[in-house]
Image (tube, rainbow, N blue to C red):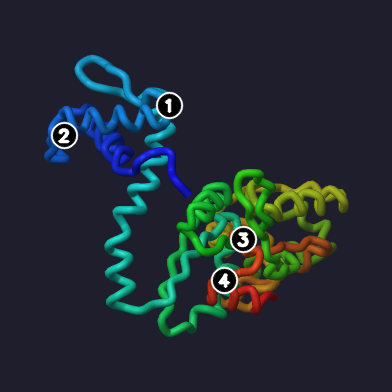
Amino acid sequence: MSTPFNYKHLYYFWVVAKEGGISKAADKLDMAVQTVSAQVRELERSLGYALLKPAGRGLVLTDAGQAAMQQADQIFQLGESLPARVRDAASTPTMRLAVGICDALPKLVVHRLLLPVISEPTLRLLCHERELTDLLGDLALHRLDVVLSDRPAPANPNIKLYSHPMGSSTIAWYGTPAMVQAAQYDFPQSLEQVPLLLPTAHTAVRVRLDQWFEQRGIHPRVVGEFEDGALLKTFGASGMGVFPAAEWVHDNLLAHYAVQCLGPCEGVTEHFFAIGTEKKVQHPLVQRLLQSVL
């Protein structure tokens, strides 16, 4: 399929925009000013919009130029990494797996989800943690092989994504021995009598927890809310309050944080998904993950 512009012209525009002027770009490219200027004009002609405009003694981006610059940044940043990736692949054969991890997903859960591939002897695992929206953008640009999340991918007419269920876990309440002892009588209504730590509203499970409180007429005394699940557990283990966690990692939770289980959060379940760009997954390590669902 033919493209409506020349990538070489786009590269010259990119350098001009970064350097702030055609003369500086020409020096950097070791080319004549007239040549660089002509290349940029040719790009503008092919796109049908002015990308640069005069500002003082230099040039600034038009609105169309800003949009073009954002795309050019992505294109040439990927291009700059190409030689290193080719060199690494040729010198050291590896099974590369780039995983996006939704920041709402508990870290102990992430570790267990990835256990089926960790034993791969040639594995090179790259983990990136951010908000789900940012990760899906990187997935669409093929910077990631898969995204692990606590919710399926939202509908997006511009990106075709597939959410593969990886299982679920019931939720329970945990705390230090002193906290558990203080809340054992008349549980779960006793949760009104002890301080609670909860995940923030950006996690899928928080909505279910709030509904659980409302259904039981419990008015919790929330003393802390955390975006990071590991941080929540750390503060809970210090005695700041009782906190919810996936029972699926019960043994690891007790071993890592020296806490006890107070009781189940009946009816509340946390779900886990692997999000990809393929309905039929091709990456062998992602296939392995999906074959080992909970």
Q: Which residue is mark 4?
A: 282
> Which dot, 3 or 1, sits closer to the camera?
1
At mark 3, the secondary structure is: strand
Q: Quadrant of residue 73?
A: top left
Residue at screen point 46% across, 57% down: 143
Q: How many marks?
A: 4
Label 3 and label 4: CA atoms lie apart by 13 Å
Q: CA distance from mark 3 to mark 1?
A: 37 Å
The crowd level at tag 1 (other Cα within 10 Å; few <14, some 14-19, many 20+) is: few
- Of badges 1 and 2, nearer the viewer stands 1
Structural distance between the alpha carbons of marks 2 and 4:
44 Å
Dot in front, 3 or 4:
4
Which type of secondary structure does the marked residue at label 1 adopt? loop
What's the amino acid at mark 3? Ile
Residue 185 horizontal/vertical position (percent) = 81, 65
Residue 16 image offset from top left, x and y in percent: 25, 33
Mark 2 lies on residue = 26
Give the label on residue 24, or none: none
Q: In this image, 177 relative to 137: left or right?
A: right
Residue drawn at the location 54% of the way across and 76% of the way down: 284
Question: Cβ–Cβ below 8 Å for labels 2 and 4?
Answer: no
- Spatial CA distance of label 4 from label 1 is 39 Å
**SS state under label 2:** helix
N-term mark: 3 or 2:
2
Real-space CA distance between mark 3 and mark 2, rounded to the nearest whole angstrom: 44 Å
Whole-percent x, y for residue 114 in the image: 55, 73
Q: Residue 48: give its label.
A: 1
Q: Earlier in the sequence, mark 4 or mark 1?
A: 1
In this figure, which residue is indicated by the disc labeled 3? Answer: 275
Q: Residue at x 69, y 47 (%)?
A: 155
